[in-house]
Amino acid sequence: MAKKLDFDKEKNNRNDNAIEEIMQAEFPLPKQAEDAKNEAFSRIREMAAASGHTENTENMVQRLQEKSTEKSTEKSTEKSTGSSGKKSTGTAKSHKKFKTVYKTALGLTAAAAVFSTVCITNPAFAENIPLVGNVFKQLGNSMGFYGDYSKYAKQLTDSAEDAELADTDESQEDGGNPQSAQAEDQNTTENNNADKTKDNESYSKTVDGTTVTLSEVYCNEMALYLSMTIHTEDKFPDTFITSDGKPNIKLSENSTVKYDYMDEKSNLFNAYLDGKMLDDNTYAGVLRIPVEDMTVDDAGWTKFYEVRNAFFKEKGIDVDSEDFSFDKLAQTLGMDEYSDENLPQVGGPAISDYVKDIKVPDRFAMELDLKDIVGTLPDDQDTTPDIPQDLRDEYNQKMAEHGISTDDADYESLTEEQKDLEHQFFTEMWNEYFERYPEAIEGNNRYNSWTLKGDWKFNVDVEKNTSDTVKKDVNVVDENGDGVLSITKTPFEITMKMQDPEAKYFAVMLDANGDIMPYGGVSNSNNTYAIQDRDISTVYIYLCDYYEYMDELKGYYWSDDYEEKAKTRTFKQLLDERAVAGTEVHFDTDK
């Protein structure tokens, strides 16, 4: 259970004073940072020796070393005294409404600039100076599905050390003649530069001042993770910050991905990025694509729906009619509750006859076409028009004429006929609103969002990494076999495979301490949990009645006095009593 914070003000003031004294003091740099600094200055000297500017450069290095020490102290002081939205969502009843550069100077100071701005201002980065190729590390535990990706992800750029080794090997192979060696070195340098340019262009594209750079890719049995940075020439647009402290940024629905094992490309729907701002111009984030989105047979589903609707028509059912409902459909077909999966039981088509079971291969290529990058504006910049007063007055007049209260508190006491009328009047009001403001009907529009226009195209080769992945059959099911069939654990997530055609159940997973496992933030689904720092040597899985869980059970855990209640009955004990089925799964032996 979460530890209670101590808000003793006097104690905190004493702590603040102690912290300030410590932060004001001078400390030697950690060894990794000191090594990075020395390497940076050594490379400056090497570059200067090659260019004949040794004396001036030594003076510059000395000044940079002095400044790096000063900056380190300044940053510590700033940190000791430094300073540190929720998007409102309405309901139907509330009626409310997100080059020219001096290359010589740049070359001589680049290494020092990287050290001073990255290593000193962000000590966590002293170990790995480059940002590209290390976005997962830079994001750290700010990610929903955080963990050590270095053992699993493939970097999408060559490291500087690899490039230097290639240069060294090729120069040594030349062997003798100085003139030949010089000419060979020049050709080698040109070829290497061309290769590096090509490589950088493959994974970094700039459109209208916005540069998207792919950093790493990791694919396991459950999802594909693609890390990237977005850099703008001008300051990054102000962005709404979600409740978990993340900028609300996504790739537009016009963005597409084409996997080489699929016949057609598909749109990237709900492609929110999980990341953070690194500075005023740079955002780093991760796109997570669940495997189920990578294996959708769009053509097969289209054909199935055509055949299904033709079957409905034969039965006298028009799915386009205004009074169509699934309840009426089930009644006409003689089904207790309608589902596509059960159509063969009443003579209808089977999904398996049209939709292919697609698996993600161990190696594949994907073509990404990122059209636009979209972010939600902060509340104070959202200019979505309010419902005009004349439309509100018209709605209220209709309600009054029919004797229907407009007080939200009275809604549940309305008759079904009154509720139907209220719904009609409410819909008419909003239809008129959208006729006046047609752009507002889109989820992201010019009122509540900003857009970075572009068309960034990438080709990425992917190799699945299934190391440290464990699958277990659990069969937490009811008498009909519906429920949780299996779970799969990767280094960063645990996913439950559900069979629940009638959507009757809600599955819950608890960690070894009996706490609800967390979702992964912007990339979550109801059946996938983020491991983060939880103890998952043992997990507990429960199958609950959906409505019972939503209306009663989950409130017990999330109540303000849960810690007190848990002294007599824990949430796990409650689920042991009330769940339809449950089990425990041990992972501690799977090393």
Image: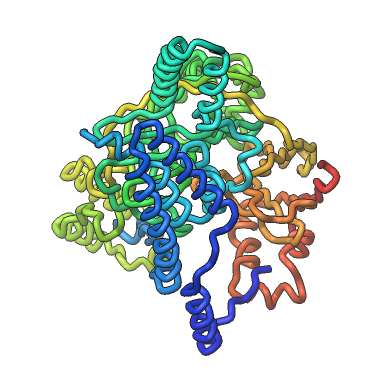
Classify the position of the N terminus by image quarter. Answer: bottom right
Figure quadrant of residue 456: top left
Say whether residue 467 is left or right of residue 90.
Answer: right
Q: Can you give x and y, in whole percent of width and height, for residue 233 in the image?
A: 26, 41
Left or right of 342? Residue 586 is right
In the rendered view, does 206 fall on the left or right side of 295? Answer: left
Whole-percent x, y for residue 385 in the image: 20, 53
Q: Is residue 412 above or below residue 201?
A: below
Residue 497 image point, x, y percent: 68, 37
Give the residue displayed 64% in from the left and 67% down from the top.
Answer: 556
Query: How was this image coloured?
Result: rainbow
Residue 541 versus residue 22 in the image, above or below: above
- Residue depicted at x 51% and y 48%: 38
Closer to us: 465 or 90? 465
| Viewer-proximal residue among 213 and 286 | 213
Give the position of the C terminus as an image quadrant.
Answer: top right
**Residue 332 visible:** no
In this rendering, the answer to whether 317 lies above or below 537 is: above
Residue at x 23% of width, y 52% of height: 384
**Foreground of the two, 330 or 451:** 451
Q: Nearer the viewer, residue 536 or 214?
A: 214
- Residue sitting at the far left: 390
The number of callouts visible is: 0
Question: Can residue 68 be seen in this snapshot?
Answer: yes
Residue at (74, 64) in percent of width and height: 574
Where does the image place residue 33, in percent across and percent down from the top left? 54, 53
* Residue 65 occupies quadrant: bottom left
